[in-house]
Amino acid sequence: MMSPYDARVDQLTAEIADLERHLAYVDQRAVALRLDRDHTAARLQDAKTARDRACKVRDAAGRVREGVSADEPPPRRRPTPIAINASDAAAMLGVGPDFFREHIVAEVPCIRRGRLRLFRVADLEQWAASAAEAPAGRGRDFGVGEFSS
């Protein structure tokens, strides 16, 4: 006959065996979930890499269509300036910096900050339009007008 103490030991041993089986199942499930998580992360990384590659190929194809080499990086888009310095203003008007300084600076409004002078592009365009000569009757049209012989 078993004593109550031995019966309790057997009961606890059976519970420990059940808990060990359950713990083994939980460990197996945790490993499976970890593998599944790692696999999902790897698939996600592969998808991101494929998307990045597809974007690069699409951009390169667009540059080739536009006549730019596919190996060159895309050009940086800079904002259009509303004011430019004197050397850029001279270049915009097609004259040298000395000619610009001697003949044009006095006629175009500028923004001054210390020694810096900035010329608004709109003011330069307006000056060029107003400084343009009439096409005929002025004597400067290659032999046409009052000074021609």
Image (spheres, helix red, strand yellow):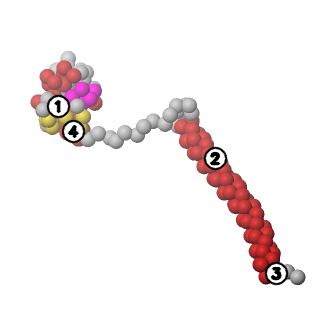
Q: Which quadrant of the view contains residue 136? A: top left
Q: Is residue 76 magenta?
A: no
- Mark nearer the N terminus (4 vs 3): 3
Point 85% across, 80% down: residue:
2
120 or 23: nearer the viewer: 23
Res 4 visible? yes
Q: Which quadrant of the view contains residue 100? A: top left
- Mark nearer the N terminus (2 vs 1): 2
Query: What secondary structure characterizes most of the magenta part?
Result: helix
Rendered-image quadrant of the C terminus: top left
- Mark nearer the N terminus (2 vs 3): 3
Residue 99, how many percent across, how many down?
19, 21
Q: Amino acid at mark 3?
A: Ser
Residue 92, how many percent across, how many down?
28, 30
Point 13% across, 35% down: residue:
112
Q: CA distance from mark 2 to mark 1?
A: 50 Å
Magenta stretch bounds: 86-91
Q: Which is in the foreground here, disc 2 or disc 4?
A: 2
65 or 103: nearer the viewer: 65
Residue 89 left/right relative to 70: left
Point 17% across, 31% down: residue:
116
Q: Is 16 placed above or below 97 here?
A: below
Circle 3 residue: 3
Q: Which is in the foreground here, disc 4 or disc 3?
A: 3
Q: Which is in the foreground here, disc 4 or disc 1?
A: 1
Instruction: Identify the disc placed on residue 120.
Output: 4
Q: Residue furthest top?
A: 149
Rendered-image quadrant of the N terminus: bottom right
- Could you say whether the residue bearing mark 3 is in a helix, strand or loop? loop
Instruction: Identify the disc placed on residue 50.
Output: 2
- Mark nearer the N terminus (2 vs 4): 2
Circle 1 residue: 116
